[in-house]
Image (cartoon, rainbow, N blue to C red):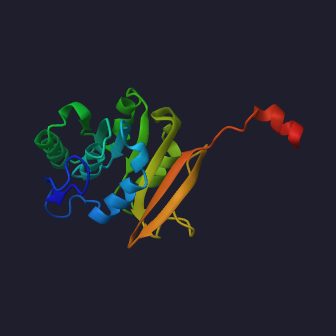
């Protein structure tokens, strides 16, 4: 069992799959992740990739998020997420997509854009780079949306931490927590005045 740490459902227990089929984000890491976004969470739309038990997305709902789409390929884990949603009574604020990550994109592009994309994939399997470098992330996000990635430290990441930013994005935050790291990305802001103004100022 896992515990929601704050918000409307603080101290409520939610189920997770026993054993090693999923790797739940620790309470400390969940708190650090969501504390960094707290001021922007109310009324936000969130995409929670590799959801596991759904603890991160449900904690975001507890803190005021309006809607979370959970993507989880493991059928048993997806069923646990749905049960947790039902137990908390937030069916109108959540949707579970039980598909492999590679097959979920077509359905996600039909969703309204998200304020945040959370990603906590299995470590060392290359999913971070696949999503960051090949998905149409600007299409999935609102203009000032953020991507938040949990990954292993430091194997597979650049020395300064985090994976390379997606095209037209920049890394804005990178923090280490034990054997894990949290990295945040946001779209690059367009140059004010466009290319012509830039040329005039060169």
Q: Nearer the viewer, residue 173 or 129?
A: 173
Can residue 163 be seen here? The reply is no
Q: Position of residue 140 (x, y in %)?
A: 46, 34
Q: Is residue 80 left or right of residue 177?
A: left
Q: Position of residue 144 (x, y in %)?
A: 53, 39
Residue positioned 32% across, 58% down in the render:
30
Total labels drawn: 0
| For residue 113, above or below residue 156 | above
Q: Is residue 151 left or right of residue 58?
A: right
| For residue 26, above or below residue 87 | below
Q: Position of residue 45 (x, y in %)?
A: 37, 36
Residue positioned 30% across, 38% down in the render:
68
Q: Nearer the viewer, residue 134 or 14?
A: 14
Residue positioned 42% across, 47% down in the render:
39
| For residue 176, above or below residue 136 | below
Looking at the image, which residue sits at the far bottom?
Answer: 178
Q: Is residue 151 left or right of residue 10?
A: right
Task: Tell me the quadrant of the picture where the N terminus can be found.
Answer: bottom left
């Amino acid at each position: 069992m896992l515990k929601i740490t704050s918000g409307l459902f603080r101290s409520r227990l939610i189920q997770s799959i026993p054993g090693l089929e999923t790797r739940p984000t620790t309470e400390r890491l969940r708190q650090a992740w969501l504390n960094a976004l707290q001021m922007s969470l109310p009324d936000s739309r969130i995409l929670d990739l590799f959801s596991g038990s759904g603890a991160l997305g449900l904690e975001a709902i507890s803190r005021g998020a309006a809607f979370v789409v959970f993507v989880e390929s493991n059928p048993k884990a997806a069923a646990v997420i749905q049960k947790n949603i039902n137990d908390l009574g937030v069916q109108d604020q959540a949707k579970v997509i039980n598909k492999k990550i590679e097959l979920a994109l077509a359905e996600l592009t039909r969703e309204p854009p998200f304020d945040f994309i959370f990603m906590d994939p299995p470590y060392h399997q290359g999913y971070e780079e696949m999503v960051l470098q090949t998905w149409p992330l600007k299409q999935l996000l609102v203009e000032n949306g953020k991507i938040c990635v949990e990954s292993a430290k430091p194997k597979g990441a650049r020395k300064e931490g985090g994976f390379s930013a997606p095209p037209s994005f920049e890394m804005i935050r990178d923090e280490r927590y034990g054997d894990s790291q949290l990295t945040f990305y946001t779209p690059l802001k367009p140059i004010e005045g466009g290319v012509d103004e830039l040329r005039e100022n060169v």
